[in-house]
Amino acid sequence: MTESSETPSDAPPRFVPLPFERLAEDEMRRRATAFHAEMNRRRTVRDFSRDPVPLDVIRSAIRTAGTAPSGAHLQPWHFAVVTDGELKRRIREAAEAEERKSYEERFPPEWLAVLAPLGTDEVKAHIEDAPVLIVVFAERTPPPGSGRTRNYYVTESVGLATGLLIAALHRAGLATLTHTPNPMGFLRELLGRPPNETAFVLLPVGYPAEGARVPDLNRKPLEGIMTWHGPAI
Ligand code: IYR
């Protein structure tokens, strides 16, 4: 009898031992506060140096992104790394064309008002200046021939992977910009990705330009983002 790939597998799930070492509480505290301090230094950067970056660091960070949890462990993500100058130029041109329409016609006043403190506009020089662009694609449905018709929690999974990617790049000393030109269909076309994928985010990656400045923003304090339900054990 042949097993149909459309029906649940009869094979029992395979489990392996989990390597896990409990840390001393002092060490847990030290790591937790040090990691927060490190991540709290991360800023979204819009002015990039054109200096090249070590590409093996990019590869490592993408490996880290690929450790994210995903719906049914289907890992519905793809990372397109762009270093070609001409391709970056074409991506910039297409992104600016969409952004121009957004800033001039599509964004309602309330949206423009919350964007104002960030100082953004339709000029996207960072797409060409940054030595590397990582375009994260979401696999909305499984690739043809996989025998499956659905992926699960795609947006959540790809969002988690992107968060890990940004953290890994920051930890490795690289700056990123989380850029979401809208609509992003041109990225699938320019990068030749298949129709079951949609672009999720475009991340210019590199070093900040000499003298780069960032908006003067505050992060919400813990009390502003957390409620506690139960005894403080
Ligand atoms: N995508 C546009 C506008 C923009 C929207 C949000 I929400 C931001 O946090 C920042 C920018 C742009 O990239 O300019």
Image (tube, rainbow, N blue to C red):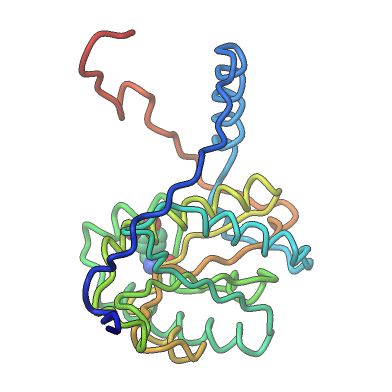
Left or right of 139? Residue 109 is left
> Residue 179: x and y, percent?
46, 65
Residue sitting at x 75%, y 64%: 56
Left or right of 35? Residue 156 is left
> Residue 12: x and y, percent?
33, 57
Check the image and report above or below for 35 versus 27: below
Q: Dividing the picture into quarters, in which one does residue 126 lie?
A: bottom right
Residue sitting at x 78%, y 66%: 51
Residue sitting at x 47%, y 70%: 136
Image quadrant containing the N terminus: bottom left
Could you say which is closer to the camera, residue 200 or residue 15? 15
Could you say which is closer to the camera, residue 109 or residue 68? 68
> Residue 76: x and y, percent?
39, 68
Could you say which is closer to the camera, residue 209 or residue 56? 56
> Residue 82: x and y, percent?
62, 78
Check the image and name the residue furthest to the front. 1
Name the quarter showing ligand 1: bottom left
Q: Dividing the picture into quarters, in which one does residue 71 lie?
A: bottom left
